[in-house]
Each structure stands twice: as structure tokens, then as C-alpha cells.
């Protein structure tokens, strides 16, 4: 088979040109056909299959493999320079799961939890929400249901709120709540009347072993199929995934970020 000339690369070839050359070289290795490979000239068009020639000497057979390996490494580096992930962002903002009925901070005239009155407002649907500032403060709101397979009417509702400080790096988040500010309320309709609603102080350090943010192109709650939103996936200390969170506000919507109450040892909640 006669050799053919091509492709020619300009002095500043684009990544697409380098990738095209890699494809041609791959075809050369697979088929054993010929190529004259000339660097830093005009970039030619057309479907060709080539075998390399260096300084006018054609390299054939087993002697070509070292050349292919070195050239492949060089072109791979040139074609795939390290780039920043354009879909990623920081955790700063207010994030909420599902239908976004559970939110931190004040939303209109309502608050998921009023720390002064020590009172919860039950949202229309379950969910979880986190807010993070860029200076190390967080707030968390959660509404969860626990069902009873034997007695469907005997479900349990748990509402949790806390805030405090956090430390984050590229792979983990550690949230340390203010002791004395957080609260948990449990509602159990089938319990004796005196214990159907229980309220107590809540402060639980939370460790997120891994997290990632990305652009969600098809979130179920958005009506416009072309609309996108930032999402965050967090994983618990044991690697179990949390519910997917969606960015709702940036800057975050939060209640006062400083500690509100002091936790006094021995005092009743």
C-alpha cells in the first residue's frame, strides 16, 4: 500500500487537532498501514492512516512501538491539560431536599423553628435543609417520618433544628452545634397523651465523610425541562448517602448565626 502525506500540525495546534492525531495513530497501530507524520506545518483534512517517519527514516515493525509510546504520552499531555471542573461550586448557600418545603432561616412570615419561642412550624412535606456561610457557620433543619408497618396510623414525626460552626475541606465537613440552642420535637400519635409530643434540647456533632456539588440538568421539581440547578450530594460518616440537596439561596438564608442560649448543666430543658 502506498504511503500518504498528512496530517500537518501548525505551530500552535488546538486540542482537537492533537486528539485527531491520536485517533490516526491508533488506527496506524491497529492496521499497520503507513504514515508520513510531519509536525508544525499546515493541518490537512481527510481520512488517512499513517506510519511515522522521523528525519526521513520510516519506522516499521517492532521498532515503531517505542516511538508510539513516547509520542502517545506527549500528545495525551498536550491534548488533555488539567482544567477546573466548571460544574463544581462551594457549599456556601441554603440547600434543601425534595420539594424544598423544609428550609432554614425565616421564609416569609414563618420559621421552621423559632429559637426564642422554642416552637416548631410543621412544613407540608418531609425534608432536610442545610445552610453554610463562607466564614464557618451552619444551620440545619430536618423533618422526618418513621412509619409502622403493623399500625400505619402509628407513625412518628421528628423535627430537628440546630446551628453552630463547621470546618470543611475538599472531601469532608464537620459541623459542631451550639449546645443549648438546638431542639428536637417528637410527635407520636399512638403514645399516651402525656408523651405524644416531646421537646428537648438537641446538639449532635455531624460528620460528613464526603460531598460533591454539580449541575443538575433534570431536577424533578422544576417545570421547565431546560432549567438547571446546583445540587449537592453528601455522605454520612459510614458512607451512606444523604438525600440529594438543591441550592435554593445564595447568600444563605439563616437565623442569627451566633449562639443564642447558654447550656447550663443541670437545668431543665
Image: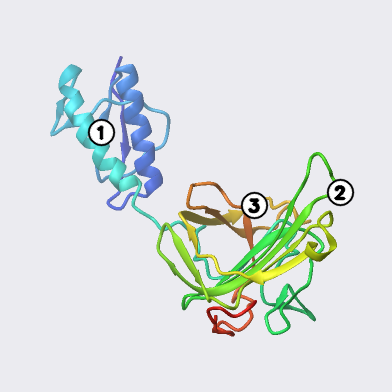
Horizontally, is 124 left or right of 34 in the view? right
Circle count: 3
- The answer to whether one can see residue 38 in this image is no
Dot 1 or dot 2: first in sequence order is 1
Residue drawn where x is 34% and y is 17% of the image = 31
For discs 3 and 2, the disc positioned in front in the rendered view: 2
- Residue 37, numbered circle: 1
Can I make out residue 219 in this image? yes
Mark 1 vs mark 2: in front: 2
Whether 197 is drawn above or below 105: the answer is above
* Element marked by disc 2: loop
Q: Distance between the Cα atoms at labels 1 and 2?
A: 76 Å
Question: Which circle, 3 or 1, is nearer the viewer?
Answer: 3
In the image, what residue occupies the spot 40% across and 63% down? 169
Q: Where residue 42 appears, x then y in whole percent?
A: 32, 44
Q: Quadrant of the rendered structure where residue 52 is?
A: top left
| Separation (CA) of disc 3 from disc 2 | 38 Å
Residue drawn at 19 percent across, 17 percent down: 61
Disc 2 residue crowd, few under 14, some 14–19, many 20+, Cα 10 Å:
few
Residue 153 disc label: 2
Q: Secondary structure at mark 1?
A: strand
Report which residue position mark 3 lands on: 217
**In the figure, 234 relative to 107: above or below?**
above
Amino acid at each position: 500500500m502506498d504511503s500518504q502525506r498528512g496530517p500537518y500540525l501548525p505551530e500552535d495546534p488546538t486540542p482537537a487537532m492533537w486528539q485527531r492525531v491520536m485517533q490516526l495513530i491508533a488506527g496506524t497501530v491497529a492496521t499497520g498501514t503507513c504514515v508520513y507524520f510531519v509536525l508544525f506545518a499546515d493541518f490537512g483534512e481527510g481520512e488517512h492512516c499513517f506510519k511515522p517517519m522521523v528525519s526521513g527514516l520510516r519506522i516499521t515493525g517492532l521498532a515503531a512501538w517505542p516511538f508510539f509510546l513516547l509520542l502517545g504520552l506527549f500528545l495525551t499531555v498536550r491534548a488533555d491539560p488539567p482544567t477546573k471542573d466548571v460544574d463544581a461550586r462551594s457549599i456556601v448557600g441554603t440547600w434543601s431536599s425534595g420539594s424544598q418545603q423544609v428550609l432554614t432561616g425565616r421564609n416569609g412570615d414563618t420559621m421552621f423553628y423559632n429559637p426564642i419561642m422554642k416552637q416548631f412550624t410543621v412544613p407540608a412535606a418531609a425534608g432536610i435543609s442545610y445552610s453554610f456561610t463562607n466564614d464557618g457557620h451552619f444551620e440545619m433543619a430536618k423533618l422526618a417520618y418513621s412509619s409502622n408497618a403493623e399500625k400505619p396510623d402509628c407513625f412518628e414525626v421528628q423535627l430537628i433544628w440546630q446551628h453552630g460552626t463547621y470546618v470543611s475541606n475538599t472531601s469532608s465537613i464537620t459541623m459542631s452545634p451550639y449546645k443549648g440552642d438546638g431542639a428536637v420535637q417528637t410527635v407520636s400519635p399512638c403514645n399516651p397523651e402525656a408523651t405524644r409530643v416531646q421537646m428537648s434540647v438537641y446538639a449532635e456533632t455531624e460528620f460528613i465523610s464526603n460531598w460533591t456539588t454539580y449541575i443538575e440538568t433534570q431536577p424533578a421539581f422544576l417545570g421547565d425541562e431546560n432549567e438547571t440547578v446546583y445540587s449537592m450530594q453528601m455522605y454520612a460518616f459510614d458512607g451512606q448517602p444523604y438525600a440529594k440537596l438543591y441550592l435554593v439561596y445564595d447568600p444563605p438564608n439563616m437565623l442569627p448565626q451566633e449562639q443564642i442560649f447558654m447550656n447550663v448543666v443541670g437545668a431543665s430543658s
